[in-house]
Image (cartoon, grey):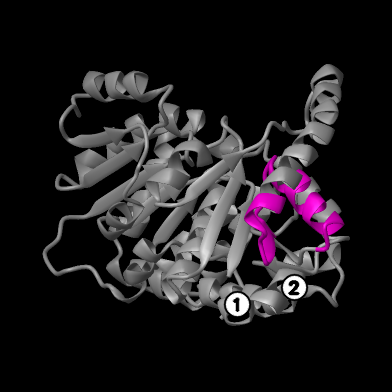
């Protein structure tokens, strides 16, 4: 079977698509996956690194822009659809999957015009603008949170969760080894988070006074790596804290962590639950429709995380929240178990099955027959 996965821009949109691609290609070596995104998004580097092929189109976002940027983005849509049509005619996919992001809209809409079955994956509790529009034409809609149901047609809807990359799935069954030093993992998404970069070094300095063997990994984003490193040097923590612009091996980073401090993007929430990690969540307050706080509540309500709004964040408050979890092994274990209970480790497999069913019924699927298995 041939599948196009469209979208990206950020890890939150892209990584579920990569997880689905991994499941499809591991299921059958004959399955082919083509990603469609942009040169400006994370997909331009991450998709080839994951071993998949990427085609690019020229498109820009519309929401939250000034009127000139909005108009310029709108004028790019016809060209993006022409580019999408060329890609789809050449690749002849049985199914097109939209994972959100700029490229998702033109590709999924063009696929609908070409009568190719379409699936959209909504990772957040509060759906984004692109998926709300595409939900009207998509054949099937996969959601990750119950809160998303009111925004889509019940006939098209299925709750299958947010797929997580295979490298992380092994963490679901892994427990920390006795005697391992306590670990803290800090990240702010694929591009880092300025607020966390500003507050965390001082918080780690406070934690180091209480937990001398604390091992800390801090992902900063490319733009602020040197600035954060300088802050740690000034606090006498150079060589103690591992700083990096981007975490390519998230599986290893999660394995070493007892507590995770991070934003509350939907993919992050899915990874935390699957890896069974206690977390302190700091939702990005300017996310569209404040959807990160809504995402965070799913883990907080389950007892797997605590939430600190950015307006309430300070080094002492953050250090106190992390220390309370690190110092209480029973609480930490309870949070890890709670995270595991809300995870959906079979999500990628179930979405793969859905794509196979749709692909078999597509016009090219009826011709190809055995290819759609």
Hey, which residue is sitting farthest left in the picture? Answer: 179
Which quadrant of the rendered structure holds the C terminus? bottom right
Residue 29 position (above or below residue 12): below
Q: Residue at x 56, y 62 (%)?
A: 300
Of residues 369 and 359, the one nearer the viewer is: 369
Instruction: Tell me: 193 left or right of 293.
Output: left
Residue 257 location (% of width, % of height): 29, 55
Which quadrant of the rendered structure holds the N terminus? bottom right
Report the span colored magenta: 89-115
Q: Which residue is mark 2?
A: 362
Of residues 136 and 170, the one nearer the viewer is: 136
| Secondary structure of residue under mark 2 | loop
- Residue 100 in sight in this render: no
Judge whether residue 102 is colored magenta: yes
Q: Which residue is mark 1?
A: 372
Judge whether residue 58 is colored magenta: no
Residue 298 position (above or below residue 340): above
Residue 227 location (% of width, % of height): 36, 18
């Amino acid at each position: 079977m041939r599948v196009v996965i469209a979208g990206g821009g950020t890890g939150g949109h892209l990584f579920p698509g990569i997880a689905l691609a991994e499941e499809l290609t591991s299921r059958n070596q004959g399955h082919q996956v083509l990603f469609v995104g942009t040169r400006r998004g994370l997909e331009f580097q991450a998709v080839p690194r994951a071993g998949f092929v990427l085609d690019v189109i020229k498109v820009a976002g519309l929401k939250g822009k000034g009127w000139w940027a909005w108009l310029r983005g709108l004028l790019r849509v016809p060209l993006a659809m022409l580019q999408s049509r060329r890609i789809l005619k050449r690749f002849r996919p049985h199914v097109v999957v939209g994972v959100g992001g700029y490229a998702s809209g033109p590709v999924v809409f063009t696929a609908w015009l070409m009568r190719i079955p379409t699936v959209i994956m909504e990772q957040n509790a509060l759906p984004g603008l692109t998926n709300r529009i595409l939900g009207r034409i998509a054949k099937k809609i996969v959601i990750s949170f119950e809160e998303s149901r009111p925004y889509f047609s019940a006939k098209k809807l299925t709750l299958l969760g947010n797929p997580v990359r295979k490298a992380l799935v092994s963490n679901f069954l892994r427990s920390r080894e006795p005697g391992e030093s306590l670990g803290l993992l800090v990240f702010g998404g694929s591009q880092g988070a300025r607020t966390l970069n500003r507050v965390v070094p001082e918080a780690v300095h406070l934690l180091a006074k209480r937990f001398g063997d604390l091992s800390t990994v801090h992902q900063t984003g490319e733009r602020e790596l040197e600035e954060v490193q300088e802050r740690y040097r000034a606090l006498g923590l150079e060589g103690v804290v591992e700083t990096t612009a981007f975490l390519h091996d998230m599986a290893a980073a999660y394995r070493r962590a007892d507590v995770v401090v991070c934003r509350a993007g939907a993919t992050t929430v899915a990874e935390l639950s699957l890896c069974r990690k206690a977390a302190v969540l700091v939702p990005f307050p300017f996310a569209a429709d404040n959807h990160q706080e809504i995402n965070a509540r799913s883990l907080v309500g389950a007892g797997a995380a605590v939430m600190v709004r950015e307006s309430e964040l300070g080094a002492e408050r953050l250090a106190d929240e992390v220390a309370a979890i690190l110092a209480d092994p029973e609480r930490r274990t309870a949070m890890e178990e709670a995270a595991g209970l809300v995870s959906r480790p079979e999500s990628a497999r179930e979405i793969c099955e859905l794509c196979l069913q749709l692909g078999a019924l597509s016009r090219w699927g009826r011709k190809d027959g055995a290819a759609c298995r």
